[in-house]
Amino acid sequence: MSRGLRRFQESGQSHFVTFSCYRRQPFFSTAETYDLFVQCLEDTRCRLEMCIYGYAVMPEHVHLLLSEPPRTRLADAIHYLKLSFAKRLRSQRSPEKSAGFWQKRYYDRNVRSYREFVVKSRYLHRNPVKRGLVSNLEDWKWSSYRHYAVREIGIVEIESEWTARDREQKARGGVPRIFLRFFSKRVSREHFFPYEEPLELVCTSPATRPDFMIKAVENRSTIRKVIGVCN
């Protein structure tokens, strides 16, 4: 990571963040380690009141698409996330096996447009398949893909159209979200995030925080495939 990197935080924009394990070693080697990080991510989201729009945990690095926390800097939030995970991992392992888990610093890119947001969302969700970790996007447990693909309610609350609708339903005493278990079989995985799909801007309620939401609409279909949210 270049020491001359300039960060533009407290901008009100979304961010695409990547940080790595020490010397890019595949320290995420067990399901328990992956699960612990996902839980720490949700704990950080709750504690700092951040919006998580997407994530993918890889063997040697992590991708996040998220908002800036309202009362602290994003850099402090990333530091808290990495430190809290390392401390909890250390409590489960011997010190010599948990020392030096993270590489210092991290990559941070401001997401300035909805089109750039979509590109980053596709990139992080496709990463496990591109790396050959799984054959199908929905088979990788430690990403937010299944939230968008099948409306799955996971450990990490993902800020999206589904989540906004859940809040509205709950406020009206409506039924909970339906888990579309066979959605991916009805809609081709190759066309879930196609670049040629049209994009439309849709206003959201204040509870979702971002100014607009991106939706990809498949022609000749009533199924709307939500890409994500951007501010």
Image (cartoon, rainbow, N blue to C red):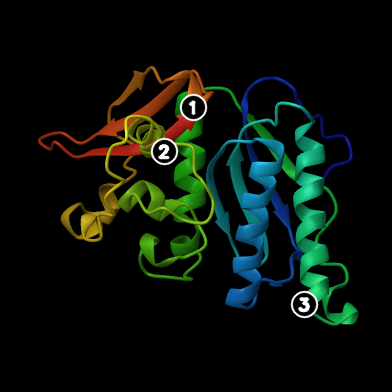
Viewed as shown, does residue 34 lie left or right of 194? right
Q: Is residue 139 above or below residue 200?
A: below
Residue 98 left/right relative to 219: right
Give the residue type that dot 3 points to.
Answer: Gln
Q: Tell me whether the residue at label 2 lies in contact with that at label 3, contact meaning CB atoms closer than 8 angstroms.
A: no
Q: Earlier in the sequence, mark 3 or mark 1?
A: 3
| Mark number, residue 43 | none
Residue placed under numbered mark 1 in the picture: 208
216 or 76: nearer the viewer: 76
How crowded is the residue under tag 1: few (<14 C-alpha within 10 Å), some, or many (20+)? some
Q: Residues within 10 Å of mark 2 (few under 14, many from 20)?
A: some
Callout 2: SS: helix
Image quadrant in which the C terminus is located? top right
| Front position in the image: 141 or 205 | 205
Q: CA distance from mark 2 to mark 3?
A: 33 Å
Q: CA distance from mark 2 to mark 1?
A: 8 Å
Q: Position of residue 230 (x, y in %)?
A: 50, 27
Instruction: Evaluate whether residue 155 shows in this view.
Output: yes
Q: Which residue is mark 2?
A: 163
Q: Which residue is mark 3?
A: 92
Q: Are marks 2 and 1 in contact (CB under 8 Å)?
A: yes
Looking at the picture, which amino acid does disc 2 mark?
A: Thr
